[in-house]
């Protein structure tokens, strides 16, 4: 039997943040995050403090607004054999795609010189993937087969964050916050196939799921400067727990065995209920920064803890990731930044069609330009405007759950078949900060 090429459409458009791919829920929230790849826990100085370390809000300007976003993301994925037949045929599995999504908007104000409060909106698309593949036997086969499968899945998280930070002294900052979390999951899967143009049997499966819910997350942190040149940052957050879920799910299957009438099966769920369901992992961040007149460098360790929520299909293990980055002053108004990051998958193993386990490694490099050296102090006239642009690249490899079809009709007609996948992602992040 010969092989035909299948078309694989696979995009992990988490359009993340420092690292995409749907592993972490970190977002690009501020120019310092964009420039360093997220190494900001000890020395964050933008609205990203509301996400990465609430204590950092205490050193922000009296009034400031930050708007950040992933302006463009380009993804190239390769997963040969995402669909395959036991007789040996497999899809080719190449794909590229682009996408752009806004990421964060924050506002910080100062009711008193030692206090700051902030409000922020963050969009963290933890998983977004589209998989479409076809595979077929050669037309000259005694029983040609053709199969099609697609999966379109998006897990989105929206945070509305409120933070209060206290500047106890120039050396010690404290902060805490409460997030309102809105979570949505949309999943559509279609699997269909036929043997001998349907004369040897055919099968069609459809699955549609839409789950939404709302809940809360608590976070707190501190920053400490034992000496002028060194800053230490630490923060921790609870898991995000949904207080309610709305589940709308339908599943249908039609199979046509050879020489027999079609058989139909179906199920439906439409349920709004209370819940206490974890949707984001608890985590802690520890950072160490060294500062000088030339700029600053920082290294962060981020540990995310296990989380298991059966009703949402979540079974995540502990992961530890690194962020290394720095911002370097070229002139009073121009700065350059660079960073390195890891984004290891918390998945234990792919458990359903299109599920993946991919570890990512990447880097960022960018530039920041402002109209003046620093924002005005409280009561001082003037307006501060800074613009940052950063290029981000990441490479990931791991496994994705494909499908293996039998050479002759069987019911069920396919089984999970994990195959290797490689993903390369390139993107441009923009950030704008205004101080007044």
Image (cartoon, rainbow, N blue to C red):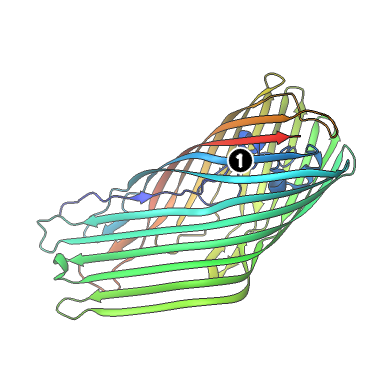
Q: Nearer the viewer, residue 261 or 351?
A: 261
- Write down the residue under mark 1: 68
Residue 117 in view in this figure: yes
Q: Quadrant of residue 370?
A: top right
Residue 186 percent location from the top left of the image: 47, 62
Quadrant, the C terminus = top right
Quadrant, the N terminus = bottom left
Residue depicted at 79% across the width and 43% down the height: 109
Left or right of residue 402: residue 321: right
Q: Nearer the viewer, residue 162 or 74?
A: 162
Say which element carries label 1. strand
Q: Nearer the viewer, residue 306 or 274?
A: 274
Residue 225 percent location from the top left of the image: 84, 37
Residue depicted at 36% across the width and 78% down the height: 266
How packed mark 1 is, by other alpha carbons closer than 10 Å (few <14, some 14-19, many 20 or more), is: many
Residue 140 position (above or below residue 434): below
Residue 347 percent location from the top left of the image: 52, 58
Residue 25 in view in this figure: no
Residue 297 position (above or below residue 314): above
Residue depicted at 63% across the width and 29% down the height: 337
Left or right of residue 292: residue 180: left
């Amino acid at each position: 039997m010969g092989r035909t090429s299948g078309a694989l459409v696979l995009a992990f458009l988490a359009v993340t943040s420092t690292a995409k791919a749907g592993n972490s829920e970190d977002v690009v929230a501020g120019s310092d995050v964009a420039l360093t790849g997220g190494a900001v826990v000890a020395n964050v100085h933008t609205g990203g403090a509301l996400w990465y370390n609430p204590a950092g809000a205490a050193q922000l300007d009296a009034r400031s607004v930050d708007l950040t976003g992933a302006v463009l993301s380009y993804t190239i994925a390769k997963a040969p054999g995402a669909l395959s037949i036991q007789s040996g045929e497999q899809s080719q599995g190449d794909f590229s795609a682009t996408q752009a999504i806004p990421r964060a908007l924050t506002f910080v104000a100062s009711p008193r010189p030692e206090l700051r409060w902030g409000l922020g909106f963050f969009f963290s698309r933890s998983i977004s993937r589209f998989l479409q593949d076809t595979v077929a036997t050669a037309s000259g086969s005694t029983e040609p087969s053709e199969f099609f499968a697609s999966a379109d899945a998006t897990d989105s998280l929206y945070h509305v964050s409120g933070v209060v930070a206290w500047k106890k002294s120039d050396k010690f900052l404290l902060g805490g916050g409460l997030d309102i979390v809105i979570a949505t999951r949309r999943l559509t899967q279609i699997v269909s196939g036929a043997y001998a143009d349907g004369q040897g049997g055919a099968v069609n499966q459809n699955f549609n799921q839409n789950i939404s819910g709302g809940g809360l997350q608590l976070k707190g942190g501190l920053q400490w400067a034992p000496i002028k040149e060194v800053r230490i940052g630490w923060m921790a957050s609870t898991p995000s727990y949904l207080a309610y879920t709305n589940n709308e799910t339908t599943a249908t299957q039609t199979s046509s065995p050879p020489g027999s009438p079609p058989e139909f099966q179906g199920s439906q769920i439409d349920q709004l209920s209370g819940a206490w369901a974890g949707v984001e992992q608890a985590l802690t961040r520890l950072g160490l920064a060294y500062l000088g007149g030339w700029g600053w460098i920082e290294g962060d360790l981020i540990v995310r803890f296990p989380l298991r929520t059966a009703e949402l299909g979540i079974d995540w293990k502990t992961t530890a990731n690194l962020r290394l980055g720095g911002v370097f002053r070229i002139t009073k108004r121009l700065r350059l930044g660079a960073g390195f990051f890891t984004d290891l998958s918390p998945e234990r193993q792919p458990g359903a069609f299109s599920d993946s386990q991919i570890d990512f490694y990447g880097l960022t490099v960018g530039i920041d330009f402002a109209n003046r050296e620093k924002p005005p102090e409280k009561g001082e006239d003037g307006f501060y405007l800074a613009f940052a642009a950063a290029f981000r690249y990441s490479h990931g490899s791991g496994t994705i759950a494909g499908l293996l079809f039998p050479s002759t009709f069987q019911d069920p007609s396919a089984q999970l078949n994990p195959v290797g996948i490689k993903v390369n992602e390139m993107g441009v992040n923009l950030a704008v900060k205004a101080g007044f």
